[in-house]
Image (tube, rainbow, N blue to C red):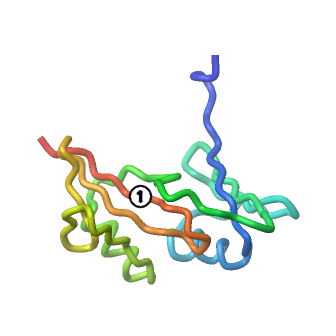
Amino acid sequence: MLAAYLPIAFLATVDAARSRQFYETALGLTFVSEDQFAIVFELRESQLRLQKVRELTPARHTVLGWAVPSLEIATKELECRGVAFERYSFLAQGEHGIWTAPSGARIAWLKDPDGNVLSLTEARRD
């Protein structure tokens, strides 16, 4: 039944001002609204809602990601905006923290100000 409807992404933040700055300025998302409960950003045809919480223990795994046509271009642009990409000792990552998965997809990870793990993925090139 729900396959016909657009999903809405939810993350949490303990510092709304810092998160709004990061998502709006560093990541370049379009701000929609803010109230006492959440900050809302446009995600193409859907939304990202950053829930305002008092406490947060971020997940240690990826919670939100974007498919990008060129990982090199996307990582370089974000680095110019002050975004740092994660390095994991258990993965063979190249420049900009890019890892090539067994499927051939290429992935880079970053964290938002609350420690939520985000990712960029470039599909396998055939």
* Quadrant into which the C terminus falls: top left
Residue 79 position within the rendered picture, expressed as x and y whole percent measured from the top left: 37, 79
Residue 51 position within the rendered picture, expressed as x and y whole percent measured from the top left: 74, 58
Which residue is under mark 1?
119
Residue 109 position within the rendered picture, expressed as x and y whole percent measured from the top left: 38, 63
* Quadrant into which the N terminus falls: top right
Q: Residue at x 47, y 60 (%)?
A: 118
Q: Is residue 17 left or right of residue 80?
A: right
Q: Amino acid at mark 1?
A: Ser
Q: Is the residue 54 above or below the residue 1 in the image?
A: below
Residue 46 position within the rendered picture, expressed as x and y whole percent measured from the top left: 61, 44
Q: Quadrant of residue 41?
A: bottom right
Q: Residue at x 65, y 56 (%)?
A: 11
Q: Is residue 73 left or right of residue 28?
A: left
Q: Residue furthest top?
A: 1
Q: Is the residue 1 above or below the residue 92 in the image?
A: above
Callout 1 secondary element = strand
